[in-house]
Image: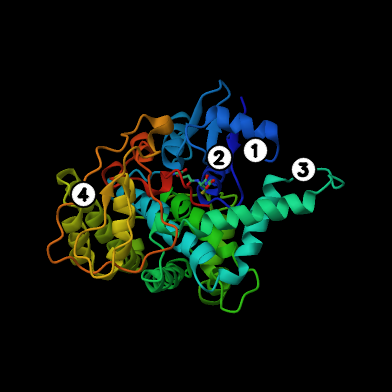
Amino acid sequence: MTYRVFGSAGSPYSVKVRSYFRYKDIDHVWVVRNSPEAMSEHAKYSKLPLVPTVVSPDGKAMQDSTPIIEAMEALFPEPAVHPADGALRFVSELLEEFGDEWGNKWMMHLRWYSASSGPTTDAYARRIAAELRSGAPPDTPGLADEVAALAASFKDRMLGRGFTVGSSEHTAPISKRSYLDAIVLLEAHFATGRPYILGRSPSMADFGLAGQLYQCFQDLLPGKDLLPGEQMRLHAPSVALWCERMVNPRPVSGGGFEAWPTLAGTLEPFLASQVAMFLMWSDANSKARGEKDNLQTGSCFNTCISRAGRSSAWISWIGGGRQGLRWRRWPPGARTCPWTWAAGGSGGRRSGGRRGTTPSRCRSSAGSTPAPPRPQGCRTSWGGAAAWSSCRLGRARRGCSGASRSGHL
Ligand SMILES: N[C@@H](CCC(=O)N[C@@H](CS)C(=O)NCC(=O)O)C(=O)O
């Protein structure tokens, strides 16, 4: 009765699912795609070329970390990762969602996009390339060159994908600030000796947040500036310990969840600053998605700007990408919206998601806000990924960025 968990050590969502399987003592093996056989096995079972993919003993495949955990939770209910109290469960699931969707912005930005991690991106890319070639006999001819070439193409791919989480020079200060504020606020929450976010047992909140923060914690290869892992060790040592604890979580002192009154003092400030920002983004993104049905993409962009203030710069990327829209360079001085409908986005490949509709000029442009600086090489055409992704807590509504075809490693 062994499950197979296809994953990667550098993948936040894979590590999240692995932590869960370990916590539940579910019989499983961790499979990395380090051979042609493992690659084709993964491809055979996966709707999208992403990890994690879980294959059950009877050959049923699952993707997307949250639905995976939910399906397993139905089969292995004890020890529960959901508090019995409804309000606390809501907080737990909200924080999981926050980790998956907003925490991923920290992780992706800090690892791949930010200027401070720039000098070390080669090393991250090589680490992943080495995992994908792990197990090759040491005397394999041309192995070093193969790893170097794989790392180079991986780095290139990831650096071109900052837009999938809205990373740009425009949003960089927000992502960096949010990461630092978040770990400092969490430090206050853990520093009193609390082992997990809601008490003595891990909940969905821990799995979602630790998946992303564990990657930040690990990212401390030498660089000019302080790297996310160093910042965590310097300013949030209890958070660093929690990240390590979450690699193989166990209930502490018999386990159990606290009640809201004892958590509120240090958890509410986190919700009020970080999660509130995420919800504001989420709301604006949802509005942006809604308005595309009227082809009001120009006004959708402006709505984003006015609704979410500074954090809106990435909304148009994500909202746009989700709609199967393609970006066109904003011509100097032009006052028309540069969005057009993608004719035949690639997202429907496996999911049966909507292909791009008839190309059409975006109609609304009156009083357009000037376009923010945007990343190079942005070619979005996601489409169907959201349709495939089974989503909860509004993911379907706003598009599940974590389930993009581009992947967030
Ligand atoms: N929503 C999915 C996200 C999965 C995802 O984005 N996986 C990334 C790694 S974290 C991936 O497979 N990337 C591969 C690639 O970019 O080629 C989940 O929660 O499992």
Mark 4, residue position:
361
Q: Residue furthest right?
A: 139
Q: Which of marks 4 and 1 is nearer the N terminus?
A: 1
On the image, the x and y values in percent for residue 262 come to 35, 62
The Cα atoms of the two marked residues, 3 and 4, are separated by 51 Å
Observer-nearest residue: 166 or 213?
166
Q: Residue at x 49, y 61 (%)?
A: 107
Q: Which of marks 1 and 2 is nearer the N terminus?
A: 2
Mark 2 and 3 residues: CB-CB less than 8 Å, in contact?
no
Q: Which of marks 2 and 3 is nearer the N terminus?
A: 2
Observer-nearest residue: 363 or 218?
363
181, above or below 21, in the image: below
Q: Assign a secondary structure to mark 3.
A: loop
Amino acid under disc 3: Gly
Mark 3, residue position:
135
Amino acid under disc 4: Arg
Q: Assign a secondary structure to mark 1.
A: strand
